[in-house]
Image (tube, grey):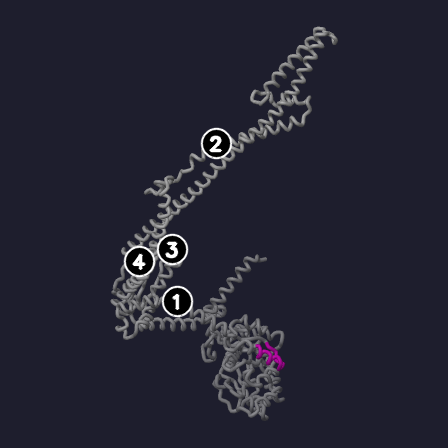
């Protein structure tokens, strides 16, 4: 079992073989087309006038940046070289404007007796711009019949382009310089106005020396006031802290009971020396602490509760505590008085602070105005200086020469013509001829719907191919009997014999779809090889309209088939023996008025029945099936029918129709004979030519024996029987049949 890969390879090889086969079959047409194209190319090359070429190679330079002013008078570097700048310049080289300039420069309009516009159109056909990929280089090629003029045009194209570019860029520069100059004047006025603003501040002592040469002086007029302001702000902050603390103590002292005052005073350190009225309280507090210590010691020493000394100390301690409480109340009053004094002092400091703040604010605003004026002055001065420098640069750029193009290869006057290129044209003509020839071969094959191969016949007609007859085979009885051409008919005879064994076919009609397919020649040669093989063979010319069989066999006859069918002539009166043994012929005879009626007569059936008994094989030549109705009558009465088909003669539809006509008439198709086949051009038929080299008469053997390998007696039984019957009946002439 073959794999899919092998099957695919075989199918691909088959397709390739089909293509090659088409070329082999149509090689004459392909060669004819090739010759025509090649000759046309050669003639066109010979008739072409000589042309000369001049080429100049140069590099196109991009323009420099030009200062442009925006709406806000801001300087912007504007570059006219966009991404497509260089390709655009390539187009400008062959634009109408540049070519008309070339025409005027070289006076081509007068030389060619036309106007500049027409001269520019002519130049466009002569000039070819060829950019170099990936670079700004370009080749300008000019082709013409005058080498000197071609060279001048090549140089003039670049010169006119350069002059045009220079004029265009100078115009742009002039506009830019004029715009910058106008803006420079306006900026100068702005700078003078800002300078005058700064000069006003020079009249005050605070800003003397403000406008220096560098313009970098910064005002420092509020430094002293700021120090005073900071000092008073710190004092206010400290007073605010003290006042807040006093208010907290006073509020707390007011809210506490007398017994709780001493603990709060001690915890908050109100007994410090800095606290107003705290001296007496501090002394009473010390005394109270001492008395408590003494009482504690007396208790430890054993003094009784009623002891006079203890009672005296207790009384004294109570008095001290009473005075301490009164002192604490006085401390609260002293704190309130201190608070009042500090609040009054804060008001005084606050007023002084506000005065200094106002002074500092006014001076700060003045300094801001001055700094803003300085900044505006510096900015305007910087813009003016930049614009002035740009004006100088653009003016110098306008005066200086700028590179527009850089020539790398100068144009030269051609010494030999560049065209026609005879070698290239002939090669191209040959290539085109081959391509067109192959294309015409495939086109003709595609348009040709005729039969081409054995496979076409077997696939579409479902009939076997009994034989393949090579091209240009003449009548075998006029040639040497040992000719290899006869072997094709022997193969056909053998295949017919194999078919006859089972079907007992004697009468065999040979038909074709149209005239000129070699049906009569095939019948003559087939009858010849049957007769050579020992068969008693009869040829019947049933083509009553265009009979050729008698002429081909060099037989002169007065009567024929038409006479036999329309009269009482005996069979031996119309059947003649040829100069070939075992071969007989029944000519057509005169053409009747109603050929179809004659062939459809009862006497025709009697004739066929009689020749079946008398001959081993009867071959009937008939008219074309698709031409007249006679052939349908013949095939309906014959035992079998063979279609003679010439490849590439009739379309397949016609052959299918021929088969249908035969089958509808009741004919039995035995097979097909491929006649007049070009086996030298069609490789698929070449295996039929092997007998040309293989077949030859055996040395030492008579030619008749070599051509008749089977015994004659075994193939002529009917003829022997007829001869015996003739002897017994004593009828002269019957021994011929």
Specify the quadrant that holds the N terminus: bottom right
Which residue in the structure is indicated by mark 3? 69
SS under mark 2? helix
Relative horizontal placement of residue 676, taking residue 207 as reference (left or right): right
Q: Earlier in the sequence, mark 3 or mark 4?
A: 3
Labels 4, 1: front one: 4
Q: Earlier in the sequence, mark 1 or mark 2?
A: 2
Relative horizontal placement of residue 15, taking residue 211 as reference (left or right): right
Mark 4 to mark 1: distance in Å? Answer: 45 Å
Q: Is residue 48 above or below residue 273?
A: below
Judge whether residue 667 is colored magenta.
Answer: yes
Specify the quadrant that holds the C terminus: bottom right
Mark 3 to mark 2: distance in Å? Answer: 54 Å
Which is nearer the eye, 455 or 435?
435
Which residue in the structure is indicated by mark 2? 231
Which residue in the structure is indicated by mark 1? 431
Which residue in the structure is indicated by mark 4? 404
Mark 1 to mark 3: distance in Å? Answer: 63 Å
């Amino acid at each position: 079992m073959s794999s899919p890969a092998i099957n695919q390879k075989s199918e691909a090889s088959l397709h390739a073989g089909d293509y090659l086969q088409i070329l082999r079959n149509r090689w004459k047409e392909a060669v004819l087309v090739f010759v025509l194209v090649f000759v046309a190319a050669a003639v066109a090359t010979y008739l072409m006038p000589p042309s000369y070429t001049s080429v100049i190679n140069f590099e196109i330079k991009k323009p420099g940046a030009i200062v442009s002013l925006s709406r806000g008078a801001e300087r912007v570097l504007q570059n006219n070289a966009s991404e497509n700048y260089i390709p655009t310049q390539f187009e400008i080289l062959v634009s109408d404007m540049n070519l008309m300039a070339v025409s005027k420069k070289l006076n081509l309009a007068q030389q060619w007796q036309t106007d500049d516009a027409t001269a520019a159109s002519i130049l466009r056909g002569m000039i070819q711009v060829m950019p170099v990929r990936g670079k700004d280089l370009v080749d300008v090629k000019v082709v013409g019949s005058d080498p000197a003029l071609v060279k001048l045009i090549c140089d003039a194209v670049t010169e006119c382009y350069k002059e045009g570019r220079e004029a265009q860029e100078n115009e742009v520069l002039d506009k830019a310089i004029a715009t910058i100059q106008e803006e420079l004047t306006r900026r100068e006025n702005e700078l003078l106005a800002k300078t005058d603003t700064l000069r006003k501040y020079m009249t005050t002592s605070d800003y003397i020396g403000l406008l220096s040469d560098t313009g970098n002086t910064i005002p420092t007029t509020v430094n002293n006031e700021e120090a005073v302001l900071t000092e008073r702000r710190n004092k206010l902050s400290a007073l605010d802290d003290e006042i807040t603390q006093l208010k907290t103590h006073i509020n707390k002292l007011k809210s506490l009971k007398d017994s709780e005052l001493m603990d709060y005073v001690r915890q908050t350190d109100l007994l410090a020396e800095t606290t107003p009225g705290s001296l007496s309280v501090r002394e009473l507090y010390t005394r109270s602490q001492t008395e408590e210590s003494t009482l504690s010691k007396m208790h430890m020493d054993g003094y009784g509760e009623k002891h006079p000394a203890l009672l005296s100390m207790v009384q004294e301690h109570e008095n001290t505590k009473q005075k301490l409480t009164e002192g604490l109340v006085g401390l609260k009053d002293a704190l309130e008085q201190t608070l009042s004094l500090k609040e009054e002092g804060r008001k005084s400091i606050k007023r002084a602070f506000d005065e200094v703040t106002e002074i500092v604010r006014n001076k700060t605003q003045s300094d801001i105005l001055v700094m803003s004026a300085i900044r505006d002055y510096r900015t305007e001065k910087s813009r003016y200086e930049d614009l002035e420098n740009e004006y100088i640069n653009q003016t110098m750029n306008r005066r200086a020469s700028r590179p527009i193009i850089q020539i790398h290869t100068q144009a030269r006057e051609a010494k030999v013509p560049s065209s026609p290129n005879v070698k290239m044209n002939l090669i191209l003509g040959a290539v085109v001829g081959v391509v067109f020839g192959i294309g015409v071969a495939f086109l003709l094959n595609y348009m040709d719907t005729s039969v081409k191969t054995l496979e076409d016949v077997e696939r579409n007609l479902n009939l076997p191919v009994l034989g393949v007859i090579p091209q240009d085979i003449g009548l075998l009885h006029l040639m040497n009997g040992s000719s290899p051409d006869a072997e094709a008919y022997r193969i056909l005879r053998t295949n017919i014999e194999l078919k006859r064994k089972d079907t007992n076919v004697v009468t065999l009609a040979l038909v074709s779809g149209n005239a000129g397919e070699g049906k009569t020649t095939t019948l003559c040669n087939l009858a010849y090889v049957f007769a050579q093989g020992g068969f008693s063979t009869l040829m019947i010319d049933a083509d009553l309209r265009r009979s050729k069989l008698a002429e081909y066999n060099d037989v002169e006859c007065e009567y024929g088939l038409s006479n036999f069918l329309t009269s009482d002539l005996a069979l031996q009166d119309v059947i003649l023996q040829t100069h070939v043994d075992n071969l007989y012929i029944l000519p057509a005879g005169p053409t009747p008025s109603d050929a179809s009626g004659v062939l459809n007569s009862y006497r025709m059936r009697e004739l066929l029945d009689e020749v079946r008994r008398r001959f081993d094989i009867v071959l009937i030549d008939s008219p074309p099936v698709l031409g007249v109705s006679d052939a349908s009558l013949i095939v309906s009465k014959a035992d079998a029918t063979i279609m003679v088909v010439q490849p590439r003669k009739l379309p397949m539809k016609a052959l299918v129709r021929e088969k249908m006509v035969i089958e509808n008439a009741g004919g039995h198709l035995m097979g097909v004979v491929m006649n007049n086949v070009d086996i030298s051009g069609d490789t698929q038929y070449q295996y039929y030519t092997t007998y040309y080299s293989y077949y030859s008469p055996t040395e030492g053997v008579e030619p008749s024996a070599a051509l008749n390998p089977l015994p004659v007696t075994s193939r002529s039984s009917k003829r022997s029987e007829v001869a015996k019957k003739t002897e017994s009946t004593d009828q002269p002439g019957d021994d011929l049949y």
